Image (cartoon, grey):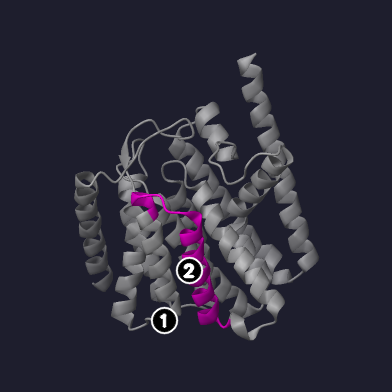
Amino acid sequence: MMYLIVLICLVLVLLAYLKLADKYNIIDKPNERSSHSNITIRGGGILFPIAILIWSFTTGIFNLFTIGLILISVISFVDDCKPLSNKIRLSIHFISIFLLMYELGLMNFHVSYLFFGFLFIGGWINAYNFMDGINGITVLYSLSVLLACFYINSQISFVDKSLLEYTAISLVVFGFFNVRKKAKVFAGDVGSVSLAFIIAFIIISLVLETLNWQYILLVSVYGVETLTTIIQRLLKKENIFKAHRSHLYQYLANEVKWPQLKVSFIFAIIQLLLNIFLISIIIPMRSSLLAVSYLTAQGLLYLIIKYFVIRKIQLKKI
């Protein structure tokens, strides 16, 4: 019954936001870098931190993670409405990540772990932001990761089950308005950043509970795509902080002209299948060499696929 009430509340919140965003012109205007052609309301991802706030009040769990989420969500929403300077935005990101790490107890570890924690969480947030470029991809991909976490949590209790459930409900509600041929609302930075923050908390909690870093691979599709694209752009001496359309999903949606939802479903299904393989075979073996080999093979396969996709596009232009 509680979950039905939460679902209804989140639907009402998003409907109210759509009206307010339309009134105050919080919209995403397409440009030469965009993967869409229609003016669409953005910032609907505000639903994700609101869902976690409801979770905090109903469970009585209000901790540094929640505070960090509020801070990073607020600054991201403000940035959606009016672009902020990188110094202000990155400062709040730094504070939020620090609060998340403190909540997880990472401050008790060696300084090398702190460095890796900041690197992973900061990189993960940027990866989610980079990948949130077509209809449905953020919702479907996140659900594929959460499904794996639901299963693992049933075997190893590493996080409050209701946190996973409230996050999933918010994704389903937002997905109803976003997983469409013509989305009614985009997540915006507030959506991609806050969702990345939530999932980072969940994944790192799992890693710390099991003392097995290989669970990071549950988000390897986004990780591999983002990291390889950054390396390719650096090799081309491009500004990696400038907006672009050189991710594989962007080539497929913009150049090959695959339907956006088709691309989104493919990415989500691939991650889901890989996670089943990871949970069934790779992770139980607890072999770092095997995990690194798996990740390397995934990266090479990704580059090969991307090469042939770009080659196909180039041949069509001749």
Start and end of the magenta stretch?
Answer: 79-105
Q: Give amino acid for label 1.
A: Asn
Residue 171 relative to residue 110: left or right: left
Q: Residue 4 occupies which quadrant of the picture? A: bottom left
Let me know if residue 151 appears in the view.
no
Dot 2 or dot 1, earlier in sequence: 1
Q: Which residue is at 46% across, 34% downward?
A: 35
Q: Which mark is residue 33?
A: none
Q: Give the image quarter of residue 156.
A: bottom right
**Residue ID for mark 1:** 63
Q: Quadrant of the C terminus?
A: top right
Q: Is residue 45 magenta?
A: no
* Whether residue 142 is situated above or below residue 1 in the rendered picture: above
Q: Position of residue 290 (x, y in %)?
A: 78, 62
Q: Residues within 10 Å of mark 2 (few under 14, many from 20)?
A: some
Q: Callout 2: helix, strand or loop?
A: helix
Say which of marks 2 and 1 sits in front: 1
CA distance for labels 2 and 1: 22 Å
Name which residue lies at 66% across and 71% down: 115
Kindly state the secondary structure of the residue where label 1 is placed.
Answer: loop
